[in-house]
Image: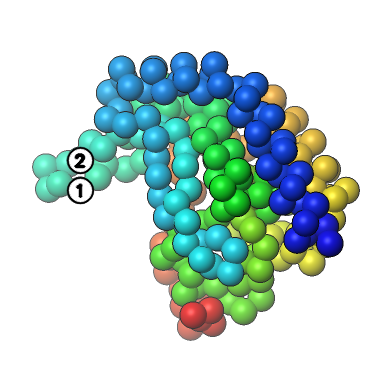
Amino acid sequence: MYINFFKPFIDKIIALLLLSLLIPVFLMIIIILYFSSIDTPFFCHQRPGLSGKPFFLLKFKTMNEKRDEKGILLPNVERITRVGSFLRKSSLDEIPQLINVLKGDLSLVGPRPLEMRYLPYYTTVQNKRHSVKPGISGWAQINGRNSVTWEEKFSRDVWYVDHISFSLDLKILFHTFLKVVKREGINSDIQNTVVPLDVYLKTINNKDSLVSCQ
């Protein structure tokens, strides 16, 4: 009952309330990004949602499109703009995801939606993370976020799926708020972003142990 009815209802009520309160901030960020070096204020990327069904995730854009002489995008750390760095540190880049919540693509709490190209790499157990809607924040995000391995993140995602409840969601939202205020576990402009899953798996030579979820 909670997962199928109350959770989506609560998500949309809170998302609508937050968007209403954040409209001035939302518009100000759009204007700042529009007049900065970034070509568009929004980052839109396809991600797997419930049952792996793709949807387009919205965020404020924090990186430019600078490329090297061969036309290859520069490393993430070299493309994060000054405005983008501030948005990441303050987590303001996540605000547009409230629109995804209103559309029903996201929940406020759930496993973070990763890239579509990662789908073949999940084990059968890890793929349970797609049995619920992905979220803006989740159990893995308040328990290590970028400081733990991919395996640990997936383990925490699966734990959340197995223990999902109203009280657990409240706990995650509360600790997410604290981490945002304290700016804990957030990539800065002098840090590179998390190593992609496929690159990580190649690094640890773990390909032979993978079970396709497709």
User: In x, y percent, where is residue 5?
Assistant: 77, 56
Q: Which mark is residue 67?
A: 2
Q: Amino acid at mark 2?
A: Arg
Report whether 124 appears left or right of 206: right
- What colouring method underlies this structural image? rainbow
Marks 1/2: CA–CA distance: 5 Å
Report whether 156 appears left or right of 72: right
Would you place residue 30 above or below residue 97 in this image? above
Q: Amino acid at mark 1?
A: Ile
Could you tell me which residue is drawn at 67 percent across and 63 percent down? 132
Report whether 34 appears left or right of 155: left
Could you tell me which residue is drawn at 68 percent across and 53 percent down? 110
Q: Residues within 10 Å of mark 1 (few under 14, many from 20)?
A: few
Residues at badges 1 and 2 in contact (C-beta under 8 Å)?
yes
Residue under label 1, please give it: 72
User: In x, y percent, where is residue 138?
Assistant: 69, 49
Q: Earlier in the sequence, mark 1 or mark 2?
A: 2
Q: Nearer the viewer, residue 154 or 214?
A: 214
Which quadrant of the structure image shows residue 75?
A: top left
Could you tell me which residue is drawn at 39 percent across and 35 percent down? 42
User: In x, y percent, where is residue 107?
Assistant: 66, 49
User: In x, y percent, where is residue 181?
Assistant: 69, 25
Q: Nearer the viewer, residue 9 or 132?
A: 9
Would you place residue 108 above or below residue 125 in this image? above
Residue 11: tell me if it is visible. yes
Q: Nearer the viewer, residue 70 or 171?
A: 171
